[in-house]
Image: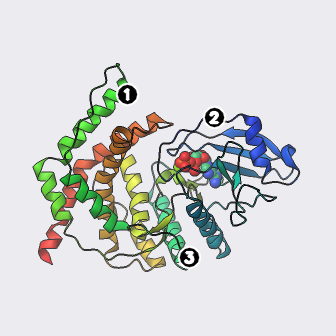
Amino acid sequence: MHQPGHRTPPIPIKQITRIASDFFEGCRKTVLSPTLTEAGFSGSTTYIFTHKHTRRRYVLKQLPRHLSLEQILWTQNLSTFTHNQGYALLPVAIHRHGGDKFLPDATPKITKHTDGSLWQCLEYIDGKPCEVPQKHQTLLGAKALATFHKVASAFQMPLRRSFCGWRRRTQQLGTIITSEPELPESNKVNNPLHSELRALYTQFVRLIHAPETIEIIRGTLKHKMSAIHQPALKDCRWEHFLFSESRDRLTGIIDIDGAGWDDPAVDMARLLGSWQLENQTRQEKLVDLWPEAFQKYSAIVEPGADFSFRVQILHDTGIICGMDRWFHWIFKEKRQFPNMKLVLRRITHLLHAAPAAIRRLERSQTRLNRN
Ligand SMILES: Nc1ncnc2c1ncn2[C@@H]1O[C@H](COP(=O)(O)OP(=O)(O)O)[C@@H](O)[C@H]1O
Ligand SMILES: [Mg+2]
């Protein structure tokens, strides 16, 4: 997922089989019973199918419409690059078997359907995400991230750069505290979902625009952090880390369409932070919750100055900015989401986690006073 929320109309199975056959010699008979996966946040249609002869499984995924070909090529090349370096955890896109008269030769791993949609075919990764991790799964996750960052730091393909890590966050936070929140109109047709979202938005505004919170956010903006730019996964929440049945092995990391240049601390904040959001009984700092994961990470790759601090502050501010983004997409951009239950769940988790995040941000400021 990169940016969530563009529902696409369903495509008949026959057509899916046709799209999949673009990636295999011998055409349509090679594809066996494509099954639709549960909708992710992006709303991209994703099918899993088995190759009739080799019995290997693949994932046919529609590319999110808002992503540029440049971005897609970049992530496809990134995973191929890491594979060639011996890092086998990312899904690799496979070549289509012929030319595509609608696409440039520079995009050999993308095909275009007659309706204009773009598709890629990825190797299937067997495994299940782990919602409640034990120490061991956090270690495996940290190890996978550290190794990825180490390997990917040598990937040189240019990509249009946007603001990274802390710079992007300070910009978002600055906008949040200087803009006047507007409560969306109450719905005239009685729509319970809209009312629920509106109630959540009211809670968000009360919490974030309270004078004490604004003061804490202003203080937070004074932190100076080194800007590290290198290839990062960015959307690496726990749902995208797959484990073996016994959970003692990480089998892969999926959904890397949103990868780009960023501070690697963003990835660690997303992974460990998303685990904490899912299991909110403990609200201490991530490094106190899972110290071994940080040790493991730093043993593999040089994490740069104040790594655990960077991770923490990106997690805490990410909770605030994440909610702001969701409400912006829903009320300002009026986006449609394929799976509204998931969206509500995500916003509710963020909202529950917000008071503790604000308290941690407040505590982090003693460090400013010390320096
Ligand atoms: N390479 C893969 N191997 C196995 N399953 C995958 C793979 N890619 C996607 N899936 C399945 O498809 C679902 C949605 O894919 P994802 O890439 O996360 O979509 P979205 O961009 O909509 O979030 C995942 O939750 C997973 O079940
Ligand atoms: Mg996803």
SS state under label 3: helix
Q: Residue under circle 1?
A: 193
Comparing labels 1 and 2, the label whose residue is closer to the camera: 2
Q: Earlier in the sequence, mark 1 or mark 2?
A: 2
Q: Residue at x 19, y 58 (%)?
A: 217
Q: Is mark 3 within 8 Å of ligand 1?
A: no
SS state under label 1: helix
Q: Earlier in the sequence, mark 2 or mark 3?
A: 2
Could you tell me if residue 219 is visible in this image? yes
As drawn, the label of residue 348 is: none
Measure how far apart labels 1 and 2 are at the Cα level.
23 Å
SS state under label 2: loop
Q: Residue at x 19, y 46 (%)?
A: 180
Residue 134, given in percent of the width and then of the height, sits at: 45, 55
Q: Residue under circle 2?
A: 10
Circle 3: residue type: Val
Quadrant occupied by the C terminus: bottom left
Left or right of 179 on screen, residue 32: right
